[in-house]
Amino acid sequence: MLVMDVFDAIEKRRSIRKYRKDDVPEVVLDRIFKAVRLAPSACNRQPWRLIIVRDAKTRTRIAKACHFVSSRSGRRHIQKWVAEAPIAIVACGLAREANTNYCNRAGEEPIVHWEWDTYQRAAAEQPGVYESTVPWDLAIALDHLSLAARAEGLGTCWMIAFDEVEIQHILSIPDEVRAPIIMTLGYPTEWPDPRPRKPLGDLVCYEKYI
Ligand SMILES: Cc1cc2nc3c(=O)[nH]c(=O)nc-3n(C[C@H](O)[C@H](O)[C@H](O)COP(=O)(O)O)c2cc1C
């Protein structure tokens, strides 16, 4: 089994948009999803479900739903390459299972462990005050996925530019379940050069906000 230090995996990960056709062995997938399972989540609720799509026809339908209009050019783009990855992972966030909604900005004590109905009522009374932890929980799980995949020699790409309603329709995802991220997975044709990052000094400051 290939061993890659966590820093190596972080440094060598890239967004991959060109994939080889080779399928990913079940044993490799199993190791990756076991790593995802260990991701932390608020109150350990693990409020997510990943739909693994291997079927070629479904992947083509998913790719067709991966379109967006660029505000710079005004042009419509379809992310056709999504169909070329042997696996598309549609990440669903389960708000009802998260059950943890902090009252962060209302000048009150943060409230945790609310039941779904209580949260819904409070959110309706004070719109914009309460936040679900689902986006964070989901992002952490998918970051585990991308790094574990890299350690296995696999590439991934995060995607948020798609028609979520169409994806819900294709995969029979219930209305109350959000599907905000798709991640492609497969062996890359090549590892692109790293994309630039801001200098560390722009990203980290000490003792107070600067
Ligand atoms: C939340 C999120 C959404 C993204 N959405 C898309 C997307 O819709 N399509 C795409 O091609 N890349 C998408 N990306 C990939 C970014 O463009 C990429 O991570 C960034 O340019 C840095 O490149 P690197 O991942 O190779 O380091 C997304 C990344 C993140 C984290």
Image (cartoon, rainbow, N blue to C red):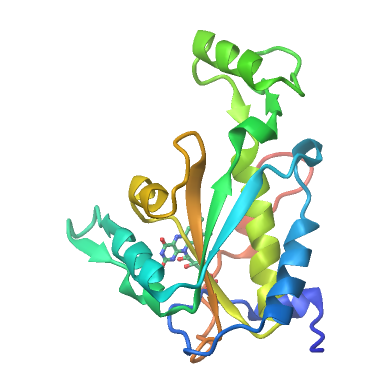
Residue lying at 29% horizontally and 64% vertically, measured from the top left = 64
Circle count:
0
Q: Quadrant of residue 13?
A: bottom right
Residue lying at 72% horizontally and 20% vertically, measured from the top left = 114
Q: Is residue 111 above or below residue 176?
A: above
Q: Quadrant of residue 142?
A: bottom right
* Rendering coords of residue 149 (x, y %): 66, 75
Q: Is residue 133 visible?
A: yes
Q: Is residue 178 above or below residue 78?
A: above
Residue lying at 76% horizontally and 15% vertically, measured from the top left = 109
Q: Is residue 28 left or right of residue 193?
A: right
Along the line of sight, the residue nearer the viewer: 26 or 147: 26
Among all residues in the image, which is located at the extreme left?
74
Q: Is residue 89 left or right of residue 33?
A: left
Among all residues in the image, which is located at the extreme top?
125
Q: Is residue 10 visible?
A: no
Q: Quadrant of residue 101?
A: top right
* Rendering coords of residue 48 (x, y %): 64, 47
Q: Quadrant of the C terminus?
A: top right
* Rendering coords of residue 207 (x, y %): 79, 42
Q: Is residue 184 left or right of residue 201?
A: left
Q: Is residue 175 above or below residue 27?
A: above
Residue lying at 44% horizontally and 36% vertically, measured from the top left = 175
Q: Quadrant of the N terminus?
A: bottom right
* Rendering coords of residue 44 (x, y %): 80, 41
